[in-house]
Image (cartoon, rainbow, N blue to C red):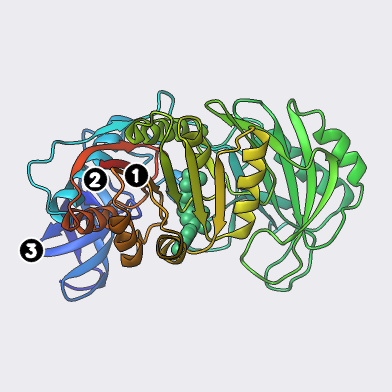
Amino acid sequence: MKKDDLIEIVIEDLGVDGEGIGKTDGITFFVKDTVIGDRVEAKIMKMKKTYGYARLMRILEPSPARVEPRCAYARQCGGCQLQAMSYEAQLAYKVNKVWNHLTRIGGLTGLPKPEILGMEDPWRYRNKAQFPFGTDKDGHAVTGFYAARSHRIVPCTECWLGVEENRPILEKILNHMEKRRIPAYEEESGKGLVRHVLIRKGFSTGEIMVCLVLNGRTLPGLSALTASLKQVEGMTSISINVNQKNTNVIMGREMIPVWGKDYITDRIGEISYQISPLSFFQVNPVQTRKLYETALEYADLKGEETVWDLYCGIGTISLFLAQKAGRVYGVEIVPEAIEDARRNAALNGFSNVEFYVGKAEEVLPEKYRSEGIRADVIVVDPPRKGLSPAVVDAMAQMAPERIVYVSCDPATLARDIGLLREKGYVLHTTKAVDMFPRCAHVETVVLLS
Ligand code: SAH
């Protein structure tokens, strides 16, 4: 088999970015834009020793899971990797992915297929959007999304994952740029003014935030644009973020308030959070609530317990736990996130939570050695790379009755469960939560004791 050959292939699985995977003559091929169960004709683009990449040419027999994508840009955009798959099939795929990893990597035999908490309405779930601005070949300002693996902007003001307010806000900004002849930022030359707009909505409060990311400190006719944006229902905060660096990083460090508050408020369950343009906040608040409620249920708190929340971010899980625990300690590496966590703890009147800035693998062993800290329950929510061995060791030494592991990567979760089982922990319950419908990612919560 060589480049440009046509192959016929049945898609059996999906890769990390949602690309279809199938085998022919013992060779594995990755074929974008396919769905599990499709029989397709594909053209080989690149061959390696044991695998290759091929481009979809023709669907010979569509998978029963195949649906017409709702969004006309689904294939170009690459933001939604699973739009051509029915929602039921997406959920089944995610359950299988978790189960396969736990069984194969974690060595857990006889594990039942976990439950998955899906969304009732799996569209418009994102509370945050960042749209880039550019100029089309006729010199007009455009906004939309970057075409896959490039910084070419495909004009589009409607995204089915984002809130409906995104569109009028983007159109107001584009009209204003057109009328005042305000140039969009150009990456190559570093010239031009408008780089991005960040839009956020508090789903439980209806509050909306617009933050213009500029290669400068102000915008011609700013008060006219502000007056127009204020007409959008729920508008609460308008600001400018200054980013004059030649970088792919979207936001700069300096914020200039323009109108209204410099934050919006949202609630997850009973807890309120103040969110500023630079704060991290989970993007799917509906599913986040289900995730945290599951973590809280697994923690099974009676009111007296000492709980550690490692990798706590802005303390969202910590505050959830603090409702039912005696004392909660959060650990997080990003100092700004801990500032948010402390502010949100105060906002909600919690006095039983304490936060530490630092690496979990340093803070936990250090506190254990020097202060002999203990824990009834430890909750962890690490980034994709999972727990470092030092954290696993310190946790085992502290010997909490229960460990609740929230994971965004089933492969490292499976590895870490293996390590914790070696320390004597037993896996009790596994639940998956669909935080990102249409995307290949899956979140998992497990209880070990
Ligand atoms: N539990 C939070 C955030 C989880 S994301 C929530 O639900 O909102 C993982 C967090 O781990 C990030 O905030 C990241 O900054 C933090 N992090 C990454 N490496 C870390 C480390 N070595 N020690 C402590 N925190 C770390």
User: Tag 1: residue type?
Assistant: Val
Q: Disc count in the image? A: 3
Identity of the residue drawn at 40% across and 60% down: 368
**Which is nearer the N-term, disc 1 or disc 2?**
2
User: Tag 3: residue type?
Assistant: Asp
**Which is nearer the N-term, disc 2 or disc 3?**
3
Residue highlighted by disc 3: 25
In the rendered view, tell whether residue 180 sits above or below residue 157.
below
The percent position of residue 407, horizontal first and vertical second, equals: 35, 48
Q: For this view, does 433 lie left or right of residue 269?
A: left
Residue 325 quadrant: top left
Mark 2 Cα-neighbour bin, 10 Å: few <14, some 14–19, many ≥20: many
**In whole angstroms, how far apart are the C-alphas of marks 1 and 2?**
8 Å
The answer to whether marks 2 and 3 mark residues whose Cβ atoms lie closer than 8 Å is: no
The answer to whether marks 1 and 2 mark residues whose Cβ atoms lie closer than 8 Å is: yes
- Image quadrant containing the C terminus: top left
The dot on residue 98 is 2
Q: For this view, does 376 lie left or right of residue 148?
A: left
**In whole angstroms, how far apart are the C-alphas of marks 2 and 3?**
28 Å
Residue highlighted by disc 1: 442
Identity of the residue drawn at 8% across and 64% down: 26
Q: For this view, does 434 lie left or right of residue 27?
A: right
Q: Nearer the viewer, residue 347 or 12?
A: 347
